[in-house]
Image: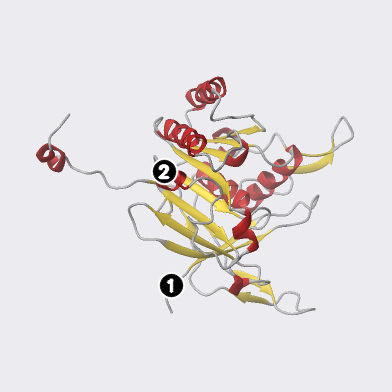
Amino acid sequence: MSNLREFFNTETRAPTYFIQDLLPASAVVYFSGPRKRGFKTFAQKFITLVAASGKPYVCGRQGKPEGKGSVGKETLMKGEPVTLIPTKPCRILSFQQEGTAIGNKERIGKIGLGLNEWDTSGLVYYKNSMGFDDYKITPQVASPILENFHFYHRPGIKFHNPESMKRLHQIIDLVKPDITVLDAITYMHNGKENDPENMLAMVDGLFGIRAKGGTVIAVMHTSKESQRNTEILDIDLDLRGHSSQLDAYDAHFGFRRLPVNKGKGWIDLICRYREREEQQFKVRWEIPKLGEIAPIRLHMVRCVEE
């Protein structure tokens, strides 16, 4: 215990980041957006795969093709493209409750193409031994992502279940991740989203992961009301669940399709931090069709006041 004089005379450390000036270290970070329209899962996968690679990624700034038959003609987002700069090759522990196994393989494999971690000969789309469509990474691929990224599909995590949390912490102690991803948080509590005790159990769980020294990304959905009413623009007030969760985050990345961008393919990203100025971006994804071996790319620019 220290008195106030000792507290003030203790030097304060500067904030640290896993993605320079974007994704803070040792933090609780919310990624939120509407169901199926916010591309928040694409975002957490892309950003954490960049962090796992340890290599900078220069985002483009393409918009959506203009008009019918205007193939190859692109509008450009205003502003300079963002470069995602990892501060080191990070160890990632990703718990993915949503989607199918092949869907997750597809996204990760094609993001790896976009990051130049492997080429089209390294990612194979094929019929597996059971006759199902599948993806695999060929043995000749050597990428830090393959060692640094640890993935669990449908892990069955429940914050209110002590045995479940014990297993979670055992995995964290084994992997020792820099970043832990929980996607999506709505499947990892007991379902009573407006119950403050239930939300506090979730918050305590997030704090427990952060106490291990890393960052935890909690992927969240917006409320049903906000998805019907696109005029609700505050990224905190349209989250699903009790308001007690709003006091817990160190950063909140809100992916929203604002009315002004309807039909233009752009997603507005607001990055709100507890102890620094808010940042705003526009993002757009370049996503190939199922079965097409082509890269997923991120276009992202920083918004500035005009």
Q: Is residue 25 above or below residue 306?
A: above
Q: Is residue 202 left or right of residue 64?
A: left
Decide if residue 115 is in sight here.
no
Disc assigned to residue 148: none
Q: Nearer the viewer, residue 146 or 159?
A: 159
Mark 1 Cα within 10 Å, few/some/many (few <14, many 20+)? few
Residue drawn at point x = 43 percent, y = 30 percent: 208
Residue identified by numbered label 2: 248
Looking at the rendered structure, the kind of residue marked 2 is Ala
Asked which secondary structure carries label 1, the reply is loop
Q: Position of residue 230 (x, y in %)?
A: 60, 66
Looking at the rendered structure, the kind of residue marked 1 is Val
Q: Is residue 60 left or right of residue 236?
A: right
**Image-quadrant location for residue 296:** bottom right
Question: CA–CA distance between discs 2 and 1?
Answer: 28 Å
What is the residue that sits farthest to the left in this orientation? 5
Residue identified by numbered label 1: 304
Residue drawn at point x = 44 percent, y = 48 percent: 246
Q: Position of residue 159 (x, y in %)?
A: 54, 30
Q: Position of residue 134 (x, y in %)?
A: 80, 39
Mark positioned earlier in the residue sequence (2 or 1)? 2
